[in-house]
Amino acid sequence: MNAPAKTEDFAIKIPDGVYAETVLSVEHYTDHLFRFRMTRPAGFRFRSGEFAMIGLMVGDKPIYRAYSIASPAWDEELEFFSIKVPDGPLTSHLQAIKPGDTVLMRKKPTGTLVLDALTPGRRLYMFSTGTGIAPFASLIRDPETYEKFEEVILTHTCRDVAELKYGFDLVEEIRNHEFLNEIVGDKLKHYATVTREDYPFKGRITTLIENGKLFADLGVPTLDPDVDRGMICGSSAMLKDTKELLEKAGLNEGANNKPAEFVIERAFVG
Ligand SMILES: Cc1cc2nc3c(=O)[nH]c(=O)nc-3n(C[C@H](O)[C@H](O)[C@H](O)COP(=O)(O)OP(=O)(O)OC[C@H]3O[C@@H](n4cnc5c(N)ncnc54)[C@H](O)[C@@H]3O)c2cc1C
């Protein structure tokens, strides 16, 4: 495995249209998951929930992959929550980054998991599996989410309990945050479930929607297109199954140019 390059190693090779940013901190959660924070380029604008292409120089070539920006639009730094794919072209290197290393980022963020793509509603569901929580890590830390919705429900489903830690840390961070805690109040509900270990909340989110346990556990009515809005981020199979359930409940899929009751985005290709 090549060590990630430092800026001075390839300063003259950085392509046009790409930022070279400095890693500020790295936290490893499991053998498969970690998060890192890096400097935010002056003038880099994005909407909470969008993704960008980030990359590393590996040898003398840059390798880029799509990454949801996990920090909110107001944050001075950028945060990412990442998988570690054994032998993955990017993440086999990215998982070795340390503070001071350089990470590349293409200049144009994009994405459908943005508040603008939803019509007004009262309750916003964010359905995520695995690293699909990343865009919602951005949105649950954005005050605009709580201006637009009275209640925000973040669901996060993983195989094992250890994989839920990033989500629990996020909610804890909000609770301890000077101004966010006041804005969020009791509007945010975090519903974490696992599929492979014993845990009080167990099962796929689609099963828990279908059998009504999600709503019973949260003490909310079942899905209603008049008041409920949704965002979904997970594997292709999870997107398909969750989307079907929302459509069955009468919600329609929206997009940036056609806001509607829910939006989806794949957490990875595969
Ligand atoms: C819109 C979008 C946003 C994304 N945001 C993130 C993000 O915030 N965090 C993140 O870790 N990844 C994210 N990804 C996936 C990311 O682009 C890479 O696939 C991932 O970093 C692995 O890169 P790699 O080169 O090591 O392996 P790749 O060759 O890209 O992937 C190898 C295989 O690993 C599996 N895989 C890849 N990513 C994941 C994942 N996140 N969870 C589970 N299995 C996976 C897939 O089966 C894939 O075929 C996103 C993808 C898309 C399309």
Image (cartoon, rainbow, N blue to C red):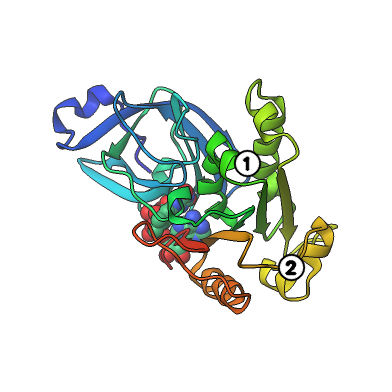
- Residue picked out by circle 1: 29
In the drawing, does residue 229 fall left or right of residue 264? right
Q: Quadrant of residue 55?
A: top left
Amino acid at circle 2: Thr
Give residue 87's position: percent from left, percent from top. 42, 55
Q: Quadrant of residue 188?
A: top right
Residue name at image x 80 percent, y 56 percent: 218
In the drawing, does residue 8 fall left or right of residue 185? left
Give residue 254's position: percent from left, percent from top. 44, 64
Residue name at image x 34 percent, y 34 percent: 45
Residue name at image x 34 percent, y 49 percent: 110
Q: How many marks?
A: 2
The answer to whether residue 88 of the structure is visible from this angle is no
Give residue 230's position: percent from left, percent from top. 57, 60
The answer to whether residue 155 of the structure is visible from this angle is yes
Amino acid at circle 1: Tyr
- Residue 109 vs 224, above or below: the answer is above
Q: Which label number is shown at residue 51?
A: none
Q: Nearer the viewer, residue 214 or 205?
A: 214
- Residue 156 vs 146, above or below: the answer is below
Give residue 112's position: percent from left, percent from top. 41, 56
Q: Secondary structure at mark 2?
A: loop
Q: Which label number is shown at residue 222?
A: 2
Mark pair 1, 2: CA separation: 34 Å
Tag nearer the camera, 1 or 2: 2
Which is more N-terminal, label 2 or label 1? Answer: 1
**Dot 2: within a 10 Å radius of its alpha carbon, few (fewer than 14), some, or many (20 or more) residues?**
some
Q: Quadrant of the C terminus?
A: bottom left
In the drawing, does residue 154 fall left or right of residue 267? right
